[in-house]
Amino acid sequence: MKITPADLQLLSALRENARASTAEIARRLGLSRTTVQSRIDRLERDGVIRGYTVRVNEDVERNHIRAHILITVLPKQMPAVVQALYAMPEVRSLHSVSGAHDLVAMGVVPTVGDMDELTDRIGAVDGVERTTSAVILSTKFER
């Protein structure tokens, strides 16, 4: 599947506001509404766009504690660990990474005590060798 520069611009516009009307996106990109709609249809059909999600206003969770939780997994335990972490709604995302740790989870909870409890629960998952947390102080930008 070939992604064109126009497709990249369209994807960028959708990342900013996936609920924007096709006509609004078309005006912004200097394309026809029909062209934008056909590109979206093709990108969905080809699996480039896998779905749409909600980005919650930062004010809603302004006082929540967010942290990157670095996780080291014992050999051959990755599938079970991933499944266990997926079941924890406080874990917003999970990434496999290179380096000293195997996974990086994004944890979001209301209080420091809740973050302590979350990291304890993650550390107690069968197959997790150790965790290290980095609390996020502020977000400079997010796309």
Image (cartoon, rainbow, N blue to C red):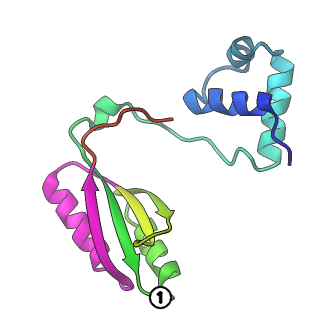
Instruction: Bin the neighbour count of mark 1 within 10 Å (Cα to Cα): few under 14, some 14-19, many 20 and up.
Output: few
Q: Residue at x 27, y 67 (%)?
A: 132
Vertical side of 101 occupied by 136: above or below: above
Q: Residue at x 41, y 69 (%)?
A: 85
Q: For the residue marked with disc 1, what is the amino acid?
A: Pro
Q: How many marks?
A: 1
Q: Residue furthest front?
A: 99
Residue 84 screen position, x and y as percent: 42, 74
Residue 114 screen position, x and y as percent: 19, 58
Residue 42 screen position, x and y as percent: 84, 39
> Is residue 36 part of the magenta span, yes or no?
no
- 8 and 81: which is toward the camera: 8
- For disc 1, the marked residue is 75
For residue 81, what is the image quadrant? bottom left
Q: Secondary structure at mark 1?
A: loop
Residue 119 screen position, x and y as percent: 25, 67
> Is residue 132 part of the magenta span, yes or no?
yes
Vertical side of 87 occupied by 18: above or below: above
In magenta, the rendered stretch is: 107-135
Q: Residue at x 36, y 33 (%)?
A: 140
Vertical side of 138 occupied by 78: above or below: below
Q: Residue at x 72, y 11 (%)?
A: 27
For residue 137, what is the image quadrant? top left
Vertical side of 140 occupied by 115: above or below: below
- Whether residue 13 appears in this view of the structure is yes
- Whether residue 125 appears in this view of the structure is no
- 11 and 102: which is toward the camera: 102
